[in-house]
Amino acid sequence: MSEAAASPRRPPKLAVALAILWMTVPALLGLTLVSQLGVASAWLSARDSDAIVIFVLCFALSTGCGLLPPYAQAILAGWTFGAVEGGIAVTLGLISGAAIGWTIARFASGPHVSAWIDANPKGKVIRHELVNASRRRTFVLLLLLRLPPNSPFAIANLAMGASGVRLFPLLAATGLGMLPRTFAICSASAAAAATGAHDIQSLIKEQGWIWFGVGLACLITALAVIAAIARRALAKAGLASL
């Protein structure tokens, strides 16, 4: 079998390398950021009126390049700016980050990933639904794919960009689809910061494990409800396997 005939069975090496990078690095750096929450928040607060602009730019670049996960920076935003301003800042960062990630994915994959996906019957059907459906249906499906809290942001950007999903429906779906989890996380983080704690470590020390556990349980419950709604909606749309 010639290399040309075999190529659809293998994704480009650069796309594979990006997938590995974006599956591992955000988790590690995200935990690091959360552990240094007080330091990062103090640094941002010292920037005065430029703090939100700096945050949005850093958020967009770090998420778009697959370095930091949205959840860690949403915690930082809620802690520093409050639920409303933090949620708005995160949403702007998510939309910008999605555009950066989509662009990188398009450059890394070229036309070869689409051919590789189409070599799998189920993958071909899913890609057709996302790429060749009407604008309205594409937007709704992307919205549902962005809704689950456990949907990895960087990997999703890679998949959408590589498979040929149009940019503007993706950006609109990113902003709206990730809004529920964004404000859930920012609200929980803002409530924790309102206790006067410097960081999560001092929060646990000053408020105790019970207060922290109850707050964490409420946040997990809210995210679980969002995830259940997303799974049910995806199943009705015929994309439960995603």
Image: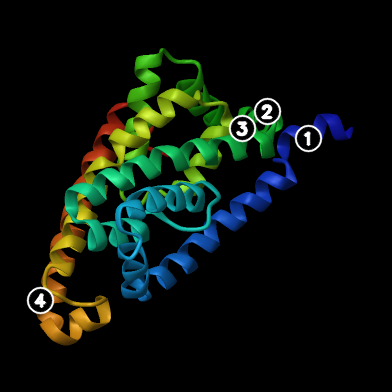
Q: Earlier in the sequence, mark 4 or mark 2?
A: 2
Residues under numbered marks 1 and 2 in contact, where contact means CB atoms less than 8 Å apart: yes
Residue 193 vertical placement versus 20 (above, below): below
Work out how far the residue at label 2 is from the one at label 3, CA to CA, in angstroms.
5 Å
Residue type at mark 1: give it.
Ser
Q: Earlier in the sequence, mark 4 or mark 3?
A: 3
Residue holding disc 3: 117
Residue holding disc 2: 115
Dot 3 falls on a residue whose secondary structure is helix
What residue is rendered at 35% in x and 52% in y? 50
Residue lying furthest right: 2
Residues under numbered marks 2 and 3 in contact, where contact means CB atoms less than 8 Å apart: yes
Q: Residues within 10 Å of mark 1 (few under 14, many from 20)?
A: some
Residue lying furthest top: 134
Residue type at mark 4: give it.
Trp
Mark 1 or 4, closer to the camera? 4
Residue holding disc 4: 211
Residue type at mark 2: give it.
Ala
Which label belongs to residue 7? 1
Image quarter for residue 196? bottom left
**Where in the figure is residue 41, as x and y percent of width and height?**
32, 67
Q: Is residue 112 left or right of residue 37?
A: right
**Where in the figure is residue 47, as x and y percent of width and height?**
35, 60
Residue 225 vertical placement versus 6 (above, below): below
